[in-house]
Amino acid sequence: MERAPLLELQGIRKRFGGLEVLKGVDLRVYPGEILALLGPSGCGKTTLLRVIAGLEAPDAGRVLLQGQDVTLLPPERRGVGFVFQDYALFPHLSALGNVAFGLKGKDRLQRAQKALERVGMTLFQNRKPHELSGGQQQRIALARALAPGPKLVLLDEPFSSLDAGLRAATREEVRKVLKETGTTALLVTHDQEEALSFADRLGVMRGGELLQVGTPEEVYLRPRTPFVAQFLGRTNLLPGEGKGGYAETCLGPVPLAEPAFGPLLLSLRPEALRLAPPGEGPLGEVVAREFKGHDLTYRVRLLGPVDREVLVQESPGAPYRVGDRVGLRVVGEGVALEGHPSKAPVGAD
Ligand SMILES: Nc1ncnc2c1ncn2[C@@H]1O[C@H](COP(=O)(O)OP(=O)(O)OP(=O)(O)O)[C@@H](O)[C@H]1O
């Protein structure tokens, strides 16, 4: 039997004037899960979070929390915590004051202290926000959101104002706290790497629609559309002819992750290709070389009947330079994308 979702969105629609910002979004988030919503700027991510929090009313659709319809409930009655992009801490209150602010009862200070302890901020409890670093403020904001023991916490680009090093470390700590407390979280980001590394599952949005939801591996390795394939990292989109377990392409036969027949469009990640001495595989010429320390990406123009460039990821020590003639080897699998006449089952005409 399928687990009951903690949060369920059914056909959420929202329009601002003439602009339809959410076009019928369905989503389920399960207890204890961290789900990241990923998409380009303006695709409706923040609006969707605001609808879930109760800060924005949808024009159509329902928001269910633990099976209960909360679409019409005000924010404070939903049991949802919110961490905004700019943390929105009260500048005149100490860290402890900020965390205790929304709490009720005689033990509110103890509970606030406990929440600060969980995020490793006990020593800083008397400091004001301006006396704290960005990462520390971020943790205070998280402690404040978690202190009332929400069913769900919504994180809107919570790491965007941190620099790269602090960002990775803070992300890891936040993930640890969420997992230790068993808190269900929905994170909005437009950072692909963040979504892939932080979330248990991720959903890719575009133009008010949720295009694909799955584990980071599923969505990265089995994108369904060209947009999802390209949004999660660089890829080669190649036309081909499905022959079952492989497709015939300008690079020769490419093994397919799932069998397909007929004309298709293939996503083949740069790491599924390698360079070789000329003579092995189709011939190409290196037109660009991008060295990034941990990896090296080449752009190679094919020197054959088809005029096309492909990206190839190599180990940092690869010897090839711009202008070199190279062979191309296919070492990984391609994925046939939807919307192209391809995915007929095995044995179909
Ligand atoms: N209150 C509002 N009134 C009018 N338009 C709005 C309002 N809120 C959002 N929008 C518009 O709705 C669209 C979606 O905005 P939203 O903030 O949800 O996108 P987003 O995916 O979170 O973008 P970003 O990554 O840039 O934060 C944008 O075109 C935005 O200008």
Image (cartoon, rainbow, N blue to C red):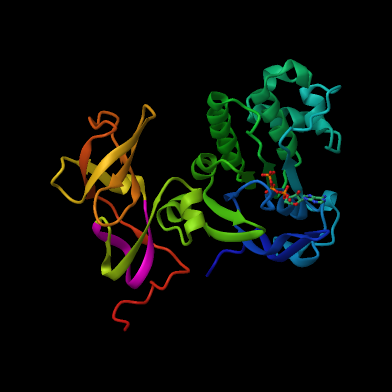
Residue under the point 68% across and 29% down: 138
Residue under the point 32% across and 82% down: 348
Q: Residue furthest bottom?
A: 349
Which residue is nearer to you in this view: 220 or 179? 220
Answer yes or no: is residue 204 visible: yes
Residue under the point 66% across and 39% down: 157
Which residue is nearer to you in this view: 154 or 37? 37
Residue under the point 82% across and 33% down: 108
Answer yes or no: is residue 214 visible: no
Q: Quadrant of the C terminus?
A: bottom left
- Please, is residue 98 above or below residue 30 in the view? above
The count of marks equals: 0
Please indicate whether residue 294 sits to the left or right of residue 304 in the image.
Answer: right
- Span colored in magenta: 252-268
Magenta stretch mostly in which secondary structure?
Answer: strand
Give how far across and how far down residue 198 sits, in percent.
53, 41
- Please, is residue 159 above or below residue 134 in the view? below
Q: Is residue 265 magenta?
A: yes
Which residue is nearer to you in this view: 139 or 43? 43
Q: Is residue 54 magenta?
A: no
Give how far across and how far down residue 172 sits, in percent.
53, 33
